[in-house]
């Protein structure tokens, strides 16, 4: 049996968004150790706050301050935290209904073990030492001192002691203007997905052929179309494919875009902007794949341009495509591949 191919892959990008008045007040409030919610027309208090009532779509602007203590409504234990999660030791994911709120906030609970967590547990906010106006300004939740097991109690009780009102859960939502000095108006949230990819038989054959500088597709036994890269099944008919067909290496540009923002990926740092990425219909294929076009000024790339792959020493796939010098392809020869 051939070795199973695997490769670690990462999808990562910074998600930047501006904040409206409600979200701005909520995150700025966290920076100031204040938790804000918003009151609906029916009197319910939503935490985290939203700008429109999820039930009626009514615009919401009445901000209120809720307590920094609350009650666990449900939870799940995480025995092996992943990189980037709030705590490096095992913890519980919890939904906490803060005092004065009618909805629950998702965060983490620092507890010595799953036996110390239960629905109905009274908890309080542990604020981060450095706060910037983000949900991470709540470092985590922790059990209120009077509910802690003995080994845990001493260290936690030494921090800000819970008041009688907090212990009794008597805190109520109080009106708040939402006004703070130097409000937070935007956030950058990094998004990252780490996963291990393992190709099937069809893609393994395709990758092996790339190592020999061949572009290998597969033909559908029903519609007779050739797809590259192959997926092991026809995307139109849904039947399995096994007949291998060598395509290209030349092809035709069907559509393209001009890239004006320099890529952050190390493999693309040496590429100067602007440059062109295009869909390329390889000769003999019925599905266009994408590739970078070089060897021609970006503003001269066009639909119908005939191109060929350029391989670098040791490269396992074409580095880019360049013009072949042939006359442009007639539109009717590739219009079905747009």
Image (cartoon, grey):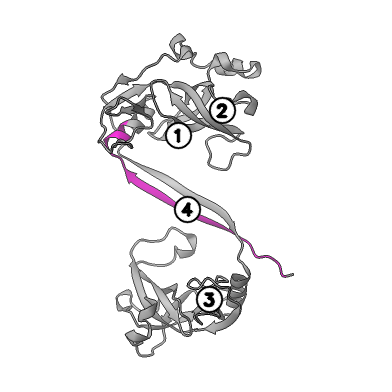
Give me the C-alpha separation between circle 3 and circle 1: 45 Å
Give me the C-alpha separation between circle 1 and circle 2: 14 Å
In front of the other: 99 or 33: 99
In this rendering, the label closer to the viewer, 3 or 1: 1
Quadrant in the picture for the C terminus: bottom left
Residue 237 lies, in percent from the top left, at 50, 73
Q: Label 1's element? A: helix
Which residues fall within the magenta stretch? Answer: 2-25
Label at residue 136: 1
Q: Is residue 236 left or right of residue 35?
A: right
Q: Read off the residue under disc 3.
A: 312
Q: Label 3's element? A: loop
Q: Label 4's element? A: strand
Q: Read off the residue under disc 4.
A: 12
Give me the C-alpha separation between circle 3 and circle 2: 52 Å
Give me the C-alpha separation between circle 4 and circle 1: 20 Å
Residue 219 lies, in percent from the top left, at 54, 80
The residue carrying pointer 1 sits among few (fewer than 14), some (14 to 19) or many (20 or more) residues within 10 Å by Cα, namely some
**Mark 1 in CB contact with mark 2 (< 8 angstroms):** no
The residue carrying pointer 3 sits among few (fewer than 14), some (14 to 19) or many (20 or more) residues within 10 Å by Cα, namely few
Could you tell which of marks 3 and 4 lies nearer the N-terminus?
4
Residue 256 lies, in percent from the top left, at 35, 72
Q: Label 2's element? A: loop
In this rendering, the label closer to the viewer, 3 or 4: 4
């Amino acid at each position: 049996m051939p070795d199973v191919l695997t490769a670690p892959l990462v999808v990562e990008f910074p998600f930047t968004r501006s904040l409206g008045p409600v979200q701005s007040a909520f995150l700025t409030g966290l920076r100031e150790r204040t938790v804000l919610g918003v009151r609906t027309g029916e009197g319910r208090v939503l935490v985290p706050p939203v700008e429109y009532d999820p039930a009626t779509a009514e615009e919401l602007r009445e901000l209120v301050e809720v307590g920094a203590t609350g009650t666990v409504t449900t939870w799940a234990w995480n025995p092996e935290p992943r990189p980037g999660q709030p705590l490096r030791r095992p913890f519980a994911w919890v939904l906490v209904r803060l005092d004065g709120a009618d909805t629950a906030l998702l965060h983490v609970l620092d507890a010595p073990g799953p036996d110390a967590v239960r629905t109905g547990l009274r908890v309080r906010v542990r604020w981060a030492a450095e706060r910037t106006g983000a949900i991470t300004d709540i470092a985590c939740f922790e059990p209120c001192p009077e509910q802690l097991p003995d080994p845990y109690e001493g260290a936690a009780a030494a921090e800000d002691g819970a008041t009688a009102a907090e212990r009794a859960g008597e805190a109520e939502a109080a009106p708040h203007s939402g006004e703070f000095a130097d409000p937070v108006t935007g956030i950058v949230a990094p998004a990252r997905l780490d996963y291990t990819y393992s190709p099937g038989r069809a893609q393994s054959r395709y990758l092996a052929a790339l190592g020999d500088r061949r572009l290998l597709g597969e033909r559908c036994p029903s519609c007779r179309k050739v797809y590259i890269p192959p997926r092991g099944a026809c995307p139109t008919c849904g039947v399995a494919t096994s007949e291998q067909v060598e395509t290209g290496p030349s092809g035709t540009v069907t559509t393209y875009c001009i890239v004006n923002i320099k890529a952050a990926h190390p493999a693309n740092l040496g590429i100067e902007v602007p440059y062109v990425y295009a869909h390329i219909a390889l000769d003999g294929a019925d599905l266009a794949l994408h590739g970078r076009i070089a060897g021609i000024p970006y503003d001269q790339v066009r639909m119908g341009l005939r191109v060929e792959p350029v391989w670098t020493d040791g490269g396992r796939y074409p580095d880019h495509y360049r013009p072949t010098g042939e006359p442009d392809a007639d539109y009717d020869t590739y219009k079905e591949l747009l």
